[in-house]
Image (cartoon, rainbow, N blue to C red):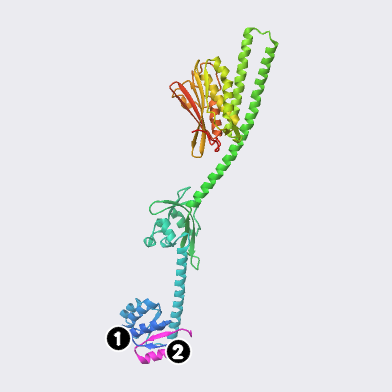
Amino acid sequence: MNNVNVLVVEDESLVAKDIQNRLIKFGYTVPTIVASGEEAINEVTKFCPDLVLMDIKLKGKMDGIETAQQIYNTCNIPIIYLTANADDSTFERANKTNPFGYILKPFKEKDLKTIIEITLNKHRIGRELKQSEQWLATVLKSIGDAVITYDHTGVVTFMNSVAEALTGWRQQDTFGKNITEVFNITHENDDTKTENYIIQVLQKGVIGIPEESILITRNGTEIPINDITTPIKDDTGNIIGAVLVFRDISEFKYAREARQKQIEQEHLVVELKRINELKDDFLSTVSHELRTPITNMRMAIQMLELLGGLAEPSHRYLKILQAECVREGELIDNLLDLQRLETASYNLVLTDAVSLQDYLPSMIESFRGRTQQREQTIQLNLLPNVPPLVTDQASLGRILAELLNNACKYTPNAGEIVLSVRLERLGKESSTIFTISNHAEISATELPRIFEKFYRVPKADPWKQGGTGLGLALVQKLVARLQGTIHVDSSNGWTTFTIKLFQSVSETAEYPN
């Protein structure tokens, strides 16, 4: 106690000196003695004592009670009143200043020492408790989780700023409110209300509430949260309240759902890959099984033709059978080619530099015999200085052959077929445009279906040549593989297919615009 400074405020000098001597005897330091409230306030400001012994009746404008009130409000120093007047009105007025004790004059030395020690211990414990509360409040306000505390009756006693932001309630608005009104949650699975769990925590000490809780804010917004509820117990184990700690898990939930979708997509990709492999195996097996009997049939037809001696009807039937074998073989080939294109079972590398001046005339010549037989005219419009086209020659040949074959098939007697090539350049971008036109018109209702599998324009085959209905579907897929586009127009008695192949002409090539 040697470091305890005590200020004595007493207007009777003999009494003040006696108190000073006794305090020094107890081991306390008494730096000074003052006789008025004004002097007391000045001395407190100078050296801030640890304790003030204040006489209630003082000379001057301020009495001891008024002086004590100012000292306590500004310095939070414990005060013990000295008084010889113990009437009720005085005590009532003094109690409003929250004194730490009273000593009635005359007093015994032992009583003075006891009340001083009690006062100092009480003030020290109160100060430590207040510091602890301030520290705890600072921690609760600064943590990232929302925190709400409530007493044993369920009344809210504290909430930090995070809890205010999530619930939509301000702390000053929650005083006297029940926790079930402020912390209103339901659960995704059973819509159970919070109140059941609040009661269980307070009555049974149950810790935590079910996962996947939905917090309903003050304005009705629903927020998914993860939380835990812990009972607060006193030294004897009795539950005196509880603390709720919770957080917004919206982002976590979205991330978890996104991850789940990613996993499902990964499984789907694996499954699709497995299905494609099974499909490829199936097609390979089926193509072999389909080709084998057709090959045997064609060999048998050839053997019958070599033997000779067949009557005219039998010979005609063999020709029909042979044509059907060819058609079925083409159908199988087209189906397999189309399947390979759709599943992208091989990568197409554009490395062939095709000289169109050499390639296209020879292709036109391959159709010349058929067009002459049907009195059709076929024409090629190609500039002489067109640069080589970098593409896949086999795919380009298949595209042009299918389109020219269709043109011959659907062009009537004495009709025209025209294959034209022109070049376009837009800055550094270049493209080669092929158009194949023929004398035949497709109705506007049929035109949108022209690239569908197995679709054939009804009553449009003047030569009754037939087909598989897969040619244009193959053409569309092949054009896409060549990084190009295809478009069809039909009007005024003409049908025109336009193919544009992008970035296919060498950038160093010179050609007319």
Residue plotted at (62% across, 12% down): 317
Q: For label 2, count other residues whose C-alpha is less than 10 Å away and answer few (under 14), some (14-19) or many (20+).
A: few
Amino acid bearing label 1: Gly
> How many residues crowd around disc 1 within 10 Å: few (fewer than 14), some, or many (20 or more)?
few
Q: Disc 1 and disc 2: Cα gap in Å?
A: 28 Å
Q: Amino acid at mark 2?
A: Ile
Q: Which residue is mark 2?
A: 24
Front one among 271 and 239:
271
As helix, strand or loop, the secondary structure at mark 1 comes to loop
Residue 353 at x, y percent in the picture: 60, 33
Instruction: Please identify the quarter of the rendering in which residue 398 is found.
Output: top right
Q: Which residue is mark 1?
A: 60
Q: Element at badge 2? A: helix
- Evaluate if marks 1 and 2 touch, with contact meaning CB atoms under 8 Å apart: no
Estimate the x, y position of residue 444 in percent, counting from the top left. 43, 24
- The magenta segment: 1-20
Above or below: residue 240 compared with residue 447: below
Q: Identify the mark nearer the N-term, 1 or 2.
A: 2
- Whether residue 102 is visible, yes or no, is no
